[in-house]
Amino acid sequence: MIDLQDALKQCFERLSRLRRQHSRIGEQNTKAGLIEPVIGALGWDLFDPDEVHREYRRRGTDNPVDYALLLLRTPRLFIEAKGLGENLDDPRWANQTISYATAAGVEWVALTDGAEWRIYNAHAPVPIEHKLFQAVRLEDDIEAATEVLFLLGKDNMRENRIEELWKGHFVDRQVHAELIELFGDGEPVSELVALLDRRLPRLTRDEIRSSLIRARAAFDFPSSTGSLRSTTTGISPGTRTPASPRSADQPIPSQPPALPRVMSSAAPRSQKRQVSDAERAIKVIDLIRAGRLRSGTRLYARYRGEQYVAELLPDGRIRYRDQVLKSPSAAGEAVKIEVHGTGISPTRKATDGLDFWSAEDAMTGEIATLKEIRRRVATNVARS
């Protein structure tokens, strides 16, 4: 059986050739050349309809799903395939497959055009735009794609290991939102001030409050997708492991990642992460061009206990309510003016918009601040 990473490399080579030829190969050729090799490398028997059921219908009157992957003749994963070059951002594709999966009792859904794979939890009790768990593009990072798609392997699906990671991801996302609220811009929440007041008896509450207003916090939730990569999964005897492989007799962790470290910009200068001029020069429009943000994506902010939503426009501007604003900072200031009124002081109104707003990183599927997404782009540029 071909190794998953080798299969993805072969798909990458086909993609590169097709891109050079400007070819649109259609859905059937995409399935044969770019999707089915991956399904096979994940340990699913392409020639057994009790395992890989093409054009699956739960009932005869239903619209078919391109692939249902089954264990004990029970669907565990739906895969909706689109022709290479189709627009996966069209909400119809994810919506219809997720809706069908929900009705059929299937938790996991993948949407792919062979170049990009998006994995959704159809049963997650969140709006559909938050059901996205992971998204990877072969042309961006073969190793990252290997680690994410590895979760869809037959043995991993049998043991429901993807559910373990989803639980950690789901919890982390909610904890992250609350931490952003606790340490975010503006007036610090009273509970945090009271806690620090008890722990810092030599400081006054006003001193603590002023310090928190000056502080900028970042939260690092390390990805745990790679922790499942083990030679014991049986996907392929030759499956490659990360640089620090887990031994075959070492148990696979079932706990979510540890809680994040909090890093404040009020720390000594030597402890701060240095932001280069090149990183500062990256604008929101550059994040769109780099494929890390999508035009039309939602931006989220938590301020004084409430969530606010804006829309990213194709030119990098932000639509909030009925206003079109030139930058995330201007959009953040619009939120504060809405909350406090036009008499808000310039100091309180001032906003670091890249910290204020979060969005889905289109490459990873994670919700992150715009500043964190900018850092990732700068890191990739520096490596290239």
Image (tube, grey):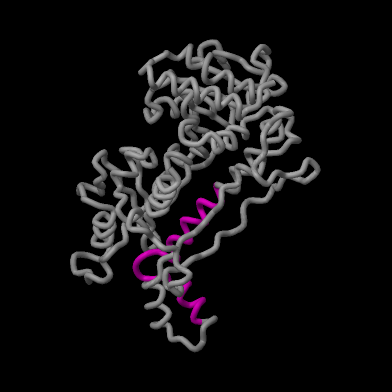
The answer to whether one can see residue 168 in this image is yes
Q: Residue furthest bottom?
A: 202
Tell me the quadrant of the picture where the N terminus can be found: top right
- Residue at image x 68%, y 46%? 244
Residue 291 in which image quadrant: top left
Residue 2 in percent (x, y) is at 66, 22
Asked if residue 171 is among those painted magenta in the image, a careful observer would answer yes
| Residue at image coords 24%, 48% | 321
- Indicate left or right for 336 with 131 as reference: left
Most extreme residue toward the right is 249
Quadrant into which the C terminus falls: top left
Q: Which residues are magenta?
A: 170-197
Nearest the viewer among 259 and 277 is 277
Question: Residue 141 vs residue 291: left or right?
Answer: right
Residue 294, image x, y percentages = 35, 38
* Residue positioned 39% across, 41% down in the render: 292
Q: Percent from the top left, x then y, of residue 245?
A: 70, 44
Task: Tell me the quarter of the picture where residue 239 sits.
Answer: top right
Q: Viewed as shown, does residue 118 lie left or right of 39?
A: left
Q: Is residue 268 above or below residue 219?
A: below
- Residue name at image x 64 percent, y 23 percent: 41
In the image, is residue 116 part of the stretch drawn in magenta? no
Kindly report the secondary structure that dominates the magenta region of the rendered protein. helix
Is residue 116 placed above or below 260 in the rendered structure? above
Can residue 190 be seen from the camera position used here? Answer: no
- In the rendered image of this protein, does residue 93 appear above or below residue 258? above
Q: Position of residue 382 (x, y in %)?
A: 42, 48
Of 142 and 28, nearer the camera is 142
Given residues 253 and 182, the one toward you in this image is 253
